Amino acid sequence: MSEVQDAVSERGPEYTVVGIVNDGAELNQVVWDLRKLRISGEDLTVVLKREEPDQPEPFPEGTRYIVVPNDIRGLEIPIGFAAIFALTGLLFAFTIPGIGTLVFVFFIALAAILAAGAFTRVGVDPILIDLEVPAEDSELWNDEFEKGKVLVFANTDDRQTLRPIWEALRKQGADFYIVERRLEPQAVSGAILRWAGEEESEEERVVGAQEA
């Protein structure tokens, strides 16, 4: 145990450069430039939103990225409960006039809360909450994400690497923030974690199995 603790203390602090990048050519160039700086593996994570989350991204092989689905996936349950609460409220209102009105108002309120929650755009908030990002930064990053921007998390324990990282981001017109701790996003709340290059391997295995 002491050897592990000594190794951690010798490694020193870690930093995360969080970039807010335009989707498309700028994003792809940022990823390539960061890979040239040897920021790869779990030290580099791209978080983006896609209507078709199963489509592979044109990143260098081995790039870690998280896709937030931009569809109605997962809304069936809350919408179904909202409909049940609404119908139950109407049933009480017509069958038990004395207390039915109060029950109707209660169930309609529950239905409205569920419906509003189902159709509220969650964005990248659950991932940022999981990372314990301060509320002010989380709100700003989520707003930019909802406007179509992509979040890039680049981790390093070498302070001298910070400047080349933010220069790579700034060269593509990206905003960036430096956090004095490691931020490694995880796929939560319906998001999907992928590694570039693995999608093609999976497709080849499926095709091979079908041909056999």
Image: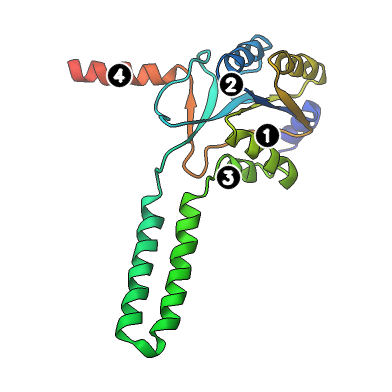
- Callout 1 amino acid: Leu
Closest to the camera, between mark 3 and mark 1, is: 3
- Mark 3 surroundings within 10 Å by alpha-carbon count, few (fewer than 14), some (14 through 19), many (20 or more): some
Q: Which residue lies under the disc numbered 1?
A: 183
Q: Quadrant of the N terminus?
A: top right
Q: Which residue lies under the disc numbered 4?
A: 205
**Who's the residue at 74% across and 44% down the image?**
136
Give the secondary structure at mark 3: helix
- Callout 2 amino acid: Gly
Residue 14 appears in the rendering: no
> Considering only order in the chain, which callout, 1 or 3, is on the residue closer to the N terminus?
3
Residue 191 horizontal side relative to residue 73, left or right: right
Q: In which quarter of the view is residue 88 placed?
A: bottom left
Circles 2 and 3: CB atoms closer than 8 Å = no
- Callout 4 amino acid: Arg
Q: CA distance from mark 1 to mark 4?
A: 33 Å
- Relative to residue 125, is residue 38 depicted above or below? above
Residue 63 horizontal side relative to residue 55, left or right: right
- Mark 1 surroundings within 10 Å by alpha-carbon count, few (fewer than 14), some (14 through 19), many (20 or more): many
User: Residue extending furthest left?
Assistant: 212
Q: Quadrant of the C terminus?
A: top left
Residue 32, image x, y percentages = 60, 11
Closest to the camera, between mark 2 and mark 3, is: 3
Q: Which residue lies under the disc numbered 2?
A: 41
- Callout 3 amino acid: Pro
- Mark 2 surroundings within 10 Å by alpha-carbon count, few (fewer than 14), some (14 through 19), many (20 or more): few
Give the secondary structure at mark 2: helix
Q: Which residue lies under the disc numbered 3?
A: 126
Closest to the camera, between mark 2 and mark 1, is: 1
Circles 4 and 2: CB atoms closer than 8 Å = no
Residue 60, image x, y percentages = 53, 13
